[in-house]
Image (cartoon, helix red, strand yellow):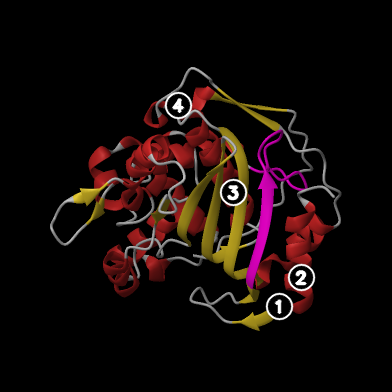
Amino acid sequence: MHAEQQYLDLLQKILDTGVDRMDRTGVGTRSIFGHQIRFDLADSFPLLTTKKVFIRGIIHELLWFISGETNIRPLVQNDVKIWNEWAFSKYLKKTGKDAEFVRYSPEWDAELISFIEKIKNDEEFAILWGDLGPVYGKQWRAWETKKWNVIDQIQNVLNTLANDPYSRRNLISWWNVGEIEELIKDKDTAPPPCHTLFQFYVADGKLSCQLYQRSADVFLGVPFNIASYALLTMMIAQVSGLKPGEFVHTFGDVHIYHNHYDQVREQLSREPRPFPVMKINPDIKDLFSFAYEDFTLEGYDPHGAIKAPIAV
């Protein structure tokens, strides 16, 4: 069976057996609770083929996470739009402009374009409006403690892989409870991380990674998540002198948004094609030295892209 079939089977399972529930976005989802899929990273790269996936955006976003950055400006400057609407939504609410625009109207689109241009070209504006709050990269690289010091979780993992590779404590948490409570109360930043924690495992000279994802938008988000963590595992394996093993993706609330049904059915009508291969510059031995140019995707022949609105 093609490994991508696991993902397609998950989509079908949610459509067939999921429960319809409302959610914080107001869009509504159909969801199931608890699921797992696995991908062998030895010979291919799990970039879905039943729709074209934006690999350039995935690479830039991952490098952004690794850097510890939380402001969208580096992404914007590389024409990566993944987080634009989160920062824009915060801007509209804080400036009182949210009542002026109907979402995705021509006026809303024009205001978003203007906002992103300012983020890209005006550093002061970007500092003021481009930050997503204490999420994502910050928790990887600068987890704050009650003693007012910070913990670099990524560096800790690299150190443990070098000195105690069989440790069962080789994990990274996104779920900083104290700061997440502030995110929930604020409601104007990006939401608390959907990726709760991930753990690394070494056996037979291979590095595997398991992600626990508390909340998963299966159509839009999960294809990115699979590729991103697979690539991170390959990168950390390389700098640690290991071979890639498996990426194991474990879900909590795994769902399809109600306004994605047509897109999901279109994707389910397509047959998977062979996965591509990801080549990584073998000269890079420092995780924090990787650049976009160090990655080459070979043999990617996907079906066409399928667009869908993001629920913010």
Specify whether 257 is left or right of 190: right
Residue at image point 45% right, 41% down: 165
Which residue corresponds to mark 1?
A: 18
Q: Amino acid at mark 3?
A: Phe
Q: CA distance from mark 3 to mark 4?
A: 19 Å
- Asked whether residue 48 is drawn in magenta, I would say yes
Q: CA distance from mark 3 to mark 2?
A: 20 Å
Whether the residues at callouts 3 and 1 have beta carbons within 8 Å, the answer is: no
Number of other residues with Cα within 10 Å of mark 4, as a class: few under 14, some 14 to 19, many 20 or more: few
Q: CA distance from mark 3 to mark 1?
A: 22 Å
Query: Sequence-wise, which precedes: disc 4 or disc 1?
Result: 1
Q: Is residue 30 visible?
A: yes
Residue at image point 75% right, 61% down: 264
Query: Sequence-wise, which precedes: disc 2 or disc 4?
Result: 2
Q: Amino acid at mark 4?
A: Ala
Badge 4 marks a residue whose secondary structure is loop
Residue numbers of the magenta segment: 34-53
Q: Position of residue 246 (x, y in %)?
A: 63, 45
Specify whether 157 is left or right of 304: left
Whether the residues at callouts 1 and 2 have beta carbons within 8 Å, the answer is: yes
Q: Amino acid at mark 1?
A: Gly
SS assignment for the magenta stretch, majority:
loop
Which residue corresponds to mark 2?
A: 13
Q: CA distance from mark 1 to mark 2?
A: 7 Å
Query: Sequence-wise, which precedes: disc 1 or disc 2?
Result: 2
Which residue corresponds to mark 4?
A: 291
Specify whether 272 is left or right of 207: right
Badge 2 marks a residue whose secondary structure is helix
